[in-house]
Amino acid sequence: MIMIETIETSSLGDRSYLATDGQVAVVVDPQRDIDRVLDLVGQRGLQVSHVVETHVHNDYVTGGLELTQRTGAAYVLAEGSGVAFDHVAVKDGQVLEAGAMRLRVLLTPGHTHFHLSYVLETADQVRAVFTGGSMLYGATGRTDLLGPADTQELTHAQFHSVRRLASELPAETEVFPTHGFGSFCSATPTSGTASTVGEQQRVNPALTLEEQEYVDTLLAGLDAYPAYYAHMAPMNSAGPAPVDLSLPQPVDPAELHRRIEAGEWVVDLRQRTAFAAGHLSRSLNFELGTNFVTYLGWLYSYGAPLTLIGESEDQVADARRELVRIGIDDLAGIAVGDIDTLADGQPLRSYRVTDFPGLAEARQHGPLQILDARRNDERAAGYVAGSQHIPLHELADRLDEVPTGEVWVYCGSGYRASIAASVLDTPGRDVVLINDSYGSAAQAGLEDDRPTEGAGATRRFHRQLTRHPTNYLQGRTMTTAAPDKVDATTVRSWLDQPDRVTVLDVRSPAEFETARIPGSINVPLNLVEKHAGQLAERLDRQVVLVCQSGNRATQAQQRLAGAGAEHLHVLDGGVAAFRSAGGEVVEGRARWSLERQVRFVAGSLVLGSLIASLRTPKAGLLAGGVGTGLTLSALTDSCTMGRVLSALPYNRGPKDRSPEEVLDQLPEPQPTR
């Protein structure tokens, strides 16, 4: 039996894979720290026959060369890759034999000129396809990493490559991309953790848009990517040195201070709030976490001396592992221990930490200097009124643009703001870190929602283009992302703060009357479809969409997302799952759910037509018509019969409400300044 194991590198948003028939293994796109692969191989008693690269990577240093040297495997790259070491060069259509497995090579340019996908086959089945930076989950790999001169050509090539995969592979083929799990190598946000070619045919923009629409959408969504990417392809082409995860010698407090005084990079790995409470003057805070390596690599000057401060050797060792993945191999030293001890009698610096409600309260007492450290695409979707915008990756070169005195710093989550705060925290500035999710800014009444005439449309365009590009450019209710499902336990916890979440029940009024979540608002699906734009304007907080099973809630999510609404979640399993999870459900008059009514009516029509066909053979055509309708409903994920039934008196509430009455039930949007 063929098994595929995923080796996740969440800090870079990438995945490597190990495919095996139980004896022989193939490794796809391994990261620099190959001990993870070797551990798997050793535990399972496997022999690695091939290490294959989908492309010469731009976002991490490969471990492929060392892995082949350690295992004796063949190292496979595309013909024309231009690498400086021995390898097996393969071209389109070539087949690699690996035990009971076959890897068929497909040339899929787009992410790079010589990008490959590998189709995993057995003697009688297409099992999977490893797509690297080509077909991702609900997106495609970005096409601008080789420079502007190649971007247009590569974007068109990406379109045709993804279409080739969809046309040549069975719908049930599992898709295993390398990028798209938070990696900046993805052109647009991805969705989901597993998929098939068939699913991608429904949601991937390269398969749902016409070619020029796809190209325009992808290019419009591209923004800055980490500066360290410029170093990755040259390192990978030259052949990376074997990885070294050992730690350098510790430095004492006196040497630590000397390095700071000399202007060297001294990075404190502690949590952002701990750093804010007390830190060495002119040290920088890059909290060790998922985003650590991306942003340190983005800002770091390659080759500069780098010393790490950590609370333990384990913490520093984790940082060391992250850094070698992007080729930062030479640490100048480490300092481990309590920050007061490392201060060696010198005073610590500190700054305040607050949230967006704290900022709103402070603004009531007078104007403030506020710095937005997010990217341009995030800024285009909304910002704190009156804030100054300098993306984090530009801050070091634009420090003179930030006035002295008090400055409040925010980003999307608090992480980048904490880095910016540490950069700004010098004598003459009083920094305040806003350690909060940007979604709270609008709820605190801080977001600029009163732009000048004409700017509102531009702002909505950017919001929809960056978050739902396919919806906007097609002008139709189709999303590139799978629905964001949330479990019932999570919804229960959200309802403890009812002022921060809106629950919309999209079932028929009669179903809503039968059983509903307390505090939920009934907005039947037909009203969502007709008035999605008006609803989206009123939804400025977390939204949970509810129905009986999830199907109608998913359709509502797609309609609202297409109209520009954000923070949309589908309750997985509907009202029944909420009840099973211990959630309170208000019970009313018992009625059949719409799904049950559809099954009853469809079954009755089929049964009746079959009985009638005993006397009148043509009556059997009705059964065929019902079957065809149900098949189309499954293929289009819609239900015409359900729409008809929902309009019957049985499925109406005590009183039909107008759209205006429904809208009046929604919470008022937060006031803006």
Image: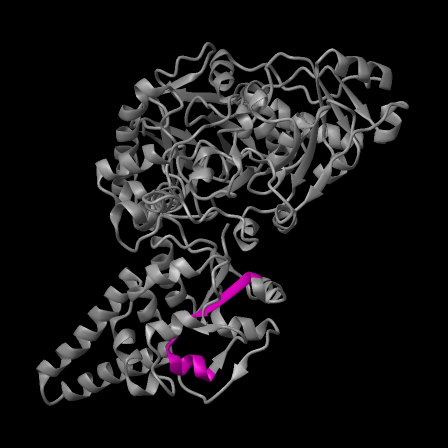
Identify the residue at image location x=57%, y=64%. Answer: 499
Is 634 left or right of 414, judged from the image as shown? left
> What segment is highlighted magenta in the picture?
500-514
Whether the magenta-drawn stretch holds residue 503 is answered as yes
The image shows residue 269, relative to residue 636, as above or below, that is above
The image shows residue 167, relative to residue 665, as above or below, that is above
Foreground: 613 or 150? 150
The image shows residue 439, relative to residue 6, as above or below, that is below
Is 141 left or right of 338, judged from the image as shown? left
Whether the magenta-drawn stretch holds residue 343 is answered as no
Quadrant hosting residue 95: top left
Foreground: 74 or 445? 445
Q: Residue furthest front?
A: 366
Q: Position of residue 208 (x, y in %)?
A: 27, 46
Quadrant hosting residue 107: top left
Q: Position of residue 132 (x, y in %)?
A: 42, 32
Quadrant hosting residue 222: top left
Identify the residue at image location x=17%, y=73%. Answer: 625
Q: Residue furthest right?
A: 345
Q: Inspect this view and state whether residue 409 appears.
A: yes
Q: Inspect this view and state whether residue 103 appears.
A: no
Foreground: 611 or 604? 604
Is 635 left or right of 352, judged from the image as shown? left
Count of numbered badges drawn on the protein:
0
Q: Position of residue 160 (x, y in %)?
A: 25, 34
Q: How is the image coloured?
A: one colour
